[in-house]
């Protein structure tokens, strides 16, 4: 699973929690800790992240889909 959020530049940032981090805290706690304060995030399956990185800077997401919480 991955954590995604819109960064200050309007692009999409992706957090890839390490297996070690997931042993000591939940992905939700990692998101609350690592997503910048006040930014909404979503927790998504790996398969939801496009594999083709050619147009990575053009990836978008609707704000309404960022329903996992807000960075602390």
Image: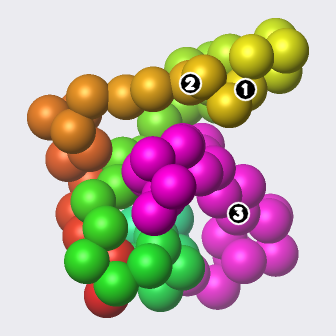
Looking at the rendered image, the disc whose residue lies closer to the viewer, 1 or 3, is: 1
Report the disc number at residue 59. 2
Label 2 packing within 10 angstroms: few (<14), some (14-19), many (20+): few
Classify residue 59 by image quadrant.
top right
Q: Which residue is mark 1?
A: 56
* Residue 29, percent from left and from top: 43, 78
Q: Are marks 1 and 3 in contact (CB under 8 Å)?
A: no
Question: Sequence-wise, which precedes: disc 2 or disc 3?
Answer: 3
x and y percent of residue 42 in the render? 36, 47
Task: Tell me the magenta residue range.
Answer: 1-25
Pointers 2 and 1 in contact (CB under 8 A)?
yes
Distance from disc 2 to disc 1, alpha carbons, whole Å, reads 6 Å
Q: Which residue is mark 3?
A: 17
Q: Residues within 10 Å of mark 1 (few under 14, many from 20)?
A: few
Q: Nearer the viewer, residue 22 or 58?
A: 58
Is residue 29 visible in this depiction of the protein?
A: no
Farthest front residue? 9
In-image side of 25 versus 62 (left or right): right
Contact flag, marks 2 and 3 (Cβ < 8 Å): no
């Amino acid at each position: 699973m991955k954590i995604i959020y819109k960064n200050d530049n309007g692009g999409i940032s992706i957090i890839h929690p390490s297996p070690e981090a997931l042993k000591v805290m939940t992905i939700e706690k990692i998101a609350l800790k690592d997503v910048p304060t006040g930014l909404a995030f979503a927790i998504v399956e790996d398969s939801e992240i496009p594999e083709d990185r050619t147009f990575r800077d053009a990836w978008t997401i609707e704000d309404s889909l960022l329903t996992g919480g807000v960075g602390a």
